[in-house]
Image: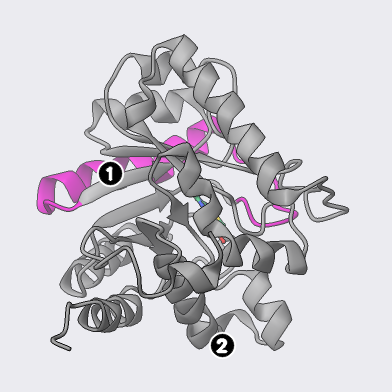
Amino acid sequence: MSYQQIKYQQSNYQQVKIMGILNVTPDSFSDGGKFSHFDSALKQVESMIEHGVDIIDIGGESTRPGAVDVSEQDELTRVIPLLKAIKENFTVQVSIDTSKTEVMEQSITYGADIINDVRALQNEGCLAVLAQCDIPVCLMHMQGMPRTMQTKPEYTNIITDIKDFFNERIIACEDAGIAKSRLILDPGFGFGKTLEQNYQLLAQLAQFHSIGLPLLSGTSRKSMIGNLLNREVTERLAGSVTTAIIAMQQGAEIIRVHDVKETVDALKILQAVAQPFEE
Ligand code: 7PJ
């Protein structure tokens, strides 16, 4: 199915969920570490809820290109108290963006609703931890590792290569005792993809529906926007909302964004246009 074929069809967008990004890494690129302090993080959560967020995604490890590794203890210290506080004060769903078994395990104990792993549960022990619970898991595709992934991404066919990766990970999950119905797939915009490859993925996102699982799309403030438009990270709002709309039109169910208010506005417009009108 091409972008043109899916436009304005198939969906009234009622199922779309907005995932708001809450980075708690001091070097997080797009909010410059502004929310690394606990109170401002909680205020940010409150504001996202006010603007209609469905899921808060807490990330304690920076995966920006070139980022250095974060220790398990540092990640736990950043993520767990915040997860606890959000669960105590709000009813919003919380997703934890991590690749570490211990962070996954403790997050699940403290009530995480989703585990979001940019390494698709490939680190040792992750599959076993997730097999012990029944929450959803997002499996993201990445070629290479953050430090080097943008060096020279290469694919035979980016869509089928990523589909092969998803199918391999789905089988690994099922073999470990994680039901397919718990999985969410994400092609991983910016994770080992050239500018052109990122836009091909966005244009052809609907191709992944053939696997039969919900799709998550995260393009917010990324280099694929900055490099195309020649915009600094603070100037990428229009590009971010536009790519979010395209992902929704391609049938993505979860849209991961920094700018919740503007993306919820865009979604409401799509929903209004998708109503059945009299001829
Ligand atoms: C993504 C993510 C993404 C999922 C990050 C950033 C880098 N998780 N975590 N998908 N990106 N599922 O936000 O720019 O695209 S961290």
Neighbour tally class for label 2: few under 14, some 14-19, many 20 plus, Cα within 10 Å:
some
Q: Quadrant of residue 228?
A: bottom right
- Which amino acid type is marked by label 2? Glu
Q: Is residue 103 visible?
A: yes
Check the picture and name the quadrant holding the C terminus.
bottom left
Mark sitting on residue 235: 2
Assess disc 1: are there few (<14), some (14-19) or many (≥20) residues with their C-alpha within 10 Å of its C-alpha.
many
Instruction: Residue at 71%, 87% (x, y): give it.
Output: 230
Image quadrant of residue 272?
A: bottom left
Is 125 inside the magenta-drawn segment? Answer: no
Of the two numbered discs 1 and 2 on the same chain, state the one appearing first in sequence.
1
The scheme the figure's colours follow is: one colour
167 and 58: which one is in front?
167
Q: Is residue 84 magenta?
A: yes
Name the one closer to the observer, 248 or 206.
206
Q: Position of residue 22 (x, y in %)?
A: 39, 59
Q: Is residue 152 above or below residue 258?
A: above
Give the residue drawn at x 73%, y 78%: 227
Q: Regarding mark 1 in the picture, which secondary structure is present there?
A: helix
Q: Is residue 183 left or right of residue 165?
A: left
- The residue at which mark 1 appears reads as 83
Q: Secondary structure at mark 2?
A: helix
- For badge 1, the amino acid type reads Leu
**Nearer the observer, 247 or 256:** 247
Q: Which residues are magenta?
A: 63-92
Q: Main secondary structure of the magenta part?
A: helix
Residue 92 vs 180, above or below: the answer is below
Q: Is residue 266 above or below residue 76?
A: below
Task: Locate residue 202, reporting x and y percent.
Answer: 58, 65
**Mark on residue 133?**
none
Alpha-carbon span between mark 1 and mark 2 = 30 Å
